[in-house]
Each structure stands twice: as structure tokens, then as C-alpha cells.
Amino acid sequence: MKALRGILQKMSSRERWLVLGLVGGLLVSAAGVYFLIMWTSISEMEALVSDGRDGFRGIERTLPRYLALKQKNEALMDRIRKNPVRSLRLPVNAIAKTVTATSEDSATTRRMSDVVRFSGKTRETPLIKTDRKGKKKKQKRTSAEGPSKDSQNLYWMEEEMDFPAVSVDSMFQFLTRVHESEDLLFINALELTRKSNDPNEVRMSLTMATIQYIEPTEEDD
């Protein structure tokens, strides 16, 4: 500071004002640059905050739907794990016993359980296919995480069965009770053909199916 005062004292009054003006201009310019940088940073932060608010609003809108779907999926998985169906004959026979196979004005009364014919061949197919080495095949993922481990233990079980001659009303009653059943029963295929000249009598062939959860073994792990 003493050296600076000495320099200023040696200058004329006009030179001192020029130097002070130059220094003041530099200070003002520096302050302007500083405030410009600060303003730009604040604007960028405000933009980030605004984007964050928009993101949170989007999360608030989609979160209830996501939680509802997740809860529904967990409930379905829990129902599949507790699925008591191990043989499709048992639940189908139980339903068939409650429905008559013939029309109400028929001379003979038979239950659908009396006429049903099971193929005796049950097919089990994993919902998540694997290769011969037991590794999961590469599939196009529908979500970021891909199929869950539980879904890799799900198996689709189905069996064909035939009702050679049933009335149309009986057919609808049987299909309705399958749909209303608490068991996980699905009709995977249905074929109706005329049995005779009687329009109220049909032959019903169908493929009944269910989903099973099979606990993984140590070899699977």
C-alpha cells in the first residue's frame, strides 16, 4: 500500500484520476462478471428445481397406480402359491357333479361327471422357458428388472377332456361355474360340435388349465 501511495503521489492529478478510473472500471467489470456467473448458476439451479418438481409431480401421479398394480400382482402370486389344484380331474369332477348333462324335459337325468372323458395326459409347461442347460433363455424384457424369480417357478398345467353329449343349457351352466370357481381354472381351448339333429344337444371338447407354483430345489438354485 505504501508503494502504491508513493506511485500515486508522483503522478499528476490528471494521471491519478485516469488510473483510479481504470481501476474502478476493472472492479465494476469484475463485479459484473461475478454477478453474471452467479445469475447463470441461480438460473440453472432454478431449472433443476423446476425439473425436480415436475418429476415429483409425475411420481405422485403414477405412484398410486404402481402401488395398486404391485399389490394386485402380489395378491395373484400369493393365490398361485396357495393353489390347491394338483390334478385337474378333481375340481372339474366337483363342478361337473353339480350340473346335469341332459335338458330338464329329458327322460333320464345324468350329471356331467357321468359323461366326461379325460384324456389322461397332463401337460406341464414352464412359463419362463429354459434351455437344455437349465439357463433362462434370453427374452425381450418388459420391465427394467425383467421376470422375477417367482415367475421362473410358475408352470402352466393343462389337460384335454370331452363331453360327448350335453345340453346347451348344461354347457353354459358348466362354463359359468368354472368361471366362478375359487380354484385357478382356465379354459384354454373350447370346441363345440353338433351331436345329433337336436339343436339343444352338443358335443363339448375343451382344454382345462391351471397355474402351479413349484418350489425350487437346491439343484435349481
Image (tube, grey):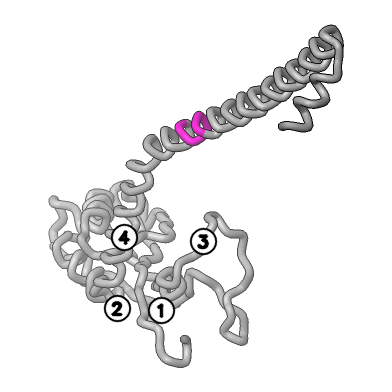
Distance, label 4 to label 2, CA atoms, is 24 Å
Tag 4 secondary structure: helix
Tag 3 secondary structure: loop
Closer to the chain start, of discs 3 and 2, is: 2
110 relative position to 186: left or right:
left
> Is the C-beta separation of discs 4 and 1 under 8 Å?
no
Q: Nearer the viewer, mark 4 or mark 2?
A: 4
> To which residue does mark 4 refer?
74
Most distant residue in the bottom direction: 219
180 relative position to 54: left or right:
left
Q: Nearer the viewer, mark 3 or mark 1?
A: 3
Q: Label 3 crowding class (10 Å Cα cut-off): few <14, some 14-19, many 20+?
A: few
Tag 1 secondary structure: strand
Three-letter amino acid code at the position of disc 2 = Ser
214 relative position to 169: left or right:
right
Q: Label 4 crowding class (10 Å Cα cut-off): few <14, some 14-19, many 20+?
A: few
12 relative position to 149: left or right:
right
Q: Quadrant of residue 164?
A: bottom left
Distance, label 3 to label 4, CA atoms, is 16 Å
Q: Which residues are magenta?
A: 49-53
Residue found 48% across the figure and 74% down from its top: 126
What is the number of the mark on residue 152? Answer: none
Distance, label 4 to label 1, CA atoms, is 28 Å
Residue found 59% across the figure and 26% down from its top: 43
Distance, label 3 to label 1, CA atoms, is 32 Å
> To which residue does mark 2 refer?
87
> To which residue does mark 3 refer?
145
Closer to the chain start, of discs 3 and 1, is: 1
Mark count: 4
